Image (cartoon, helix red, strand yellow):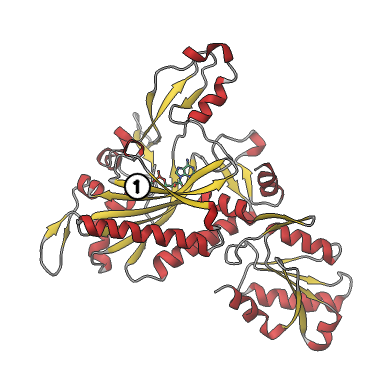
């Protein structure tokens, strides 16, 4: 983990938030390469979940909503974690994280028997205050992006000509006042979610089938982007672990350096949410009215980013290589003039660079020798390095070097854009 954190900082993937003031627990900033990686993950998700499907539409709801939303959704009452406090040093931890409790107990070996206060329910919603007149209006930063979808259910049905079964997809920030943020970005207080709420007729069999369908879709999506099957598993929620809205639920977990860890939840929310918001659906054919059921897939963008980084990190013969799937790689290619002091080569390389930049994020490097430039691009996961050399000036071909195999081939400049495009489908 330390190597990933160091690489993330050194190469501009992830920095601690407001670092020059000492940072702030549970908040992170994405640097130039991290912003690209995260954007690529979100774009791939959107493409698979919305663009490629006829039964899903997108939404972008506000972060702050009328506080009544959170009352109706049950979050004000039940969106809690059990909090205990150490009687000796006042450290607050989650009672449902035995490993973290044990770790702390080591610091007070003589007092273990009576170390913790009784668990109290601690609400995770983050409060904000709005307006100019006192008392200011209390509202909440959304604790899940989901409620924005439910409260817009009728708007979408009325405006988008959708018919059940259909889904509403959304990507956006959520906020939780986590008791113990930690494991780098894994448990943050501000994070992004990519969620699908899929509405179906209330029917036990249909509910089970749809739940299983989306489990498979989501697992396949991670596999298609390079996660290894043996590093992923499903973990069904026992009834006592289920969120207040879930009829049944399973997590997709990743075998992280800090243990198997959830990064996406598939939830059967039944009619909980639409029922609480008193929203129904009228079947256009039969005219019958009912409260639809919802199957939800809820992925964490930051956790996926972290796990794709961990999965990609390889040390091969003194090279650090991020073997990111080319679709996720922040830079699709890097362009080098063989040497920096030959104007003809540099000009030609600039032309190739500008040509590729119209389609892709592309890096430019003319420092040091080619070997060092390869190492630098390997470390950030650039799949193809393109070198413009003296032969290029004669025959308009370039050397393309593959990140994973280190093999090189000659490719014509006129087919370079297609060469990369073919590998990105
Ligand atoms: N709408 C359902 C929902 O929010 P959840 O299991 O509480 O379900 C879904 O959260 C996903 O959001 C998690 O699997 C995780 O990837 C991400 N997530 C939740 N809390 C997080 C946190 N504190 N930091 C980073 N990601 C988090």
Q: Nearer the viewer, residue 205 or 127?
A: 205
Q: Position of residue 261 (x, y in %)?
A: 50, 44
417 to 28, vertically: above or below: below
* Mark 1 close to ligand 1, CB under 8 Å: yes
Question: Which residue occupies 28% across, 64% down?
Answer: 166
Q: Quadrant of ligand 1?
A: top left
Q: Position of residue 143 (x, y in %)?
A: 39, 42
The quadrant holding residue 64 is: top left
Question: Which residue occupies 19% across, 57% down?
Answer: 203
Indicate left or right for 52 with 408 as reference: left
Q: Nearer the viewer, residue 366 or 77?
A: 77
Q: Nearer the viewer, residue 206 or 271?
A: 206
- The residue identified by callout 1 is 249
The quadrant holding residue 226 is: bottom right
Indicate left or right for 138 with 11 as reference: left
115 to 61, vertically: above or below: above
Question: Which residue occupies 25% across, 69% down?
Answer: 161
- Helix, strand or loop at label 1? It is strand
Q: Position of residue 168 (x, y in %)?
A: 33, 60
The quadrant holding residue 395 is: bottom right
**Dividing the image into 4 quarters, which one contains the N terminus?**
top right
């Amino acid at each position: 983990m330390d190597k990933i954190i160091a690489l993330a900082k050194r190469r501009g993937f992830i920095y601690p938030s407001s670092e020059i003031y000492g940072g702030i627990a549970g908040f992170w900033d994405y640097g130039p390469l991290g912003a690209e990686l995260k954007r690529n993950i979100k774009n791939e998700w959107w493409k698979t979940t919305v663009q490629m499907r006829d039964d899903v539409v997108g939404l972008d709801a506000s972060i702050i909503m009328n506080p009544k939303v959170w009352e109706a959704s049950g979050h004000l009452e039940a969106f809690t974690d059990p909090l205990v406090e150490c009687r000796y040093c006042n450290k607050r931890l989650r009672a449902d994280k035995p490993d973290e409790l044990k770790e702390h107990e080591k610091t007070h070996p003589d007092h273990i028997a009576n170390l913790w206060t009784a668990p109290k329910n601690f609400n995770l919603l983050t409060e904000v205050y709005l307006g100019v007149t006192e008392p200011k209006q209390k509202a909440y930063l959304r604790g899940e992006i989901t409620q924005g979808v439910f409260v817009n259910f009728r708007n979408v049905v009325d405006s988008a000509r959708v018919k059940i079964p259909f889904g509403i997809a959304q990507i956006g920030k959520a906020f939780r006042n986590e008791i113990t943020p930690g494991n780098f970005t894994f448990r943050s207080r501000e994070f992004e979610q990519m969620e699908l709420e899929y509405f179906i007729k209330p029917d036990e069999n249909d509910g089970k089938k749809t739940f299983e369908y989306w489990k498979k879709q989501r697992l396949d999506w991670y596999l298609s982007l390079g996660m290894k099957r043996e590093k992923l598993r499903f973990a069904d929620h026992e009834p006592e672990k289920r969120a207040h809205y879930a009829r049944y639920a399973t997590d997709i977990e990743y075998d992280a350096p800090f243990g198997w860890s959830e990064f996406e939840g598939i939830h059967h929310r039944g009619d909980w949410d639409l029922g609480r918001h008193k929203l129904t659906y009228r079947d256009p054919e039969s005219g019958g009215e009912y409260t639809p059921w919802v199957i939800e897939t809820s992925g964490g963008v930051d956790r996926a980013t972290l796990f794709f980084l961990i999965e990609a990190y390889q040390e091969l013969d003194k090279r650090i290589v991020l073997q990111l799937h080319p679709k996720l790689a922040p830079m699709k290619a890097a362009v080098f003039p063989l040497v920096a002091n030959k104007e003809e080569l540099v000009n030609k390389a600039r032309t190739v660079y500008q040509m590729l930049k119209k389609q892709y994020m592309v890096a430019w490097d003319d420092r040091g020798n080619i070997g060092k430039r390869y190492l630098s691009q390997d470390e950030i996961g650039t799949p193809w390095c393109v070198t413009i050399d003296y032969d290029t000036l004669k025959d308009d071909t370039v050397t393309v070097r593959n990140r994973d195999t280190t093999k090189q081939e000659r490719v014509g400049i006129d087919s370079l854009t297609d060469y990369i495009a073919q590998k990105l489908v």
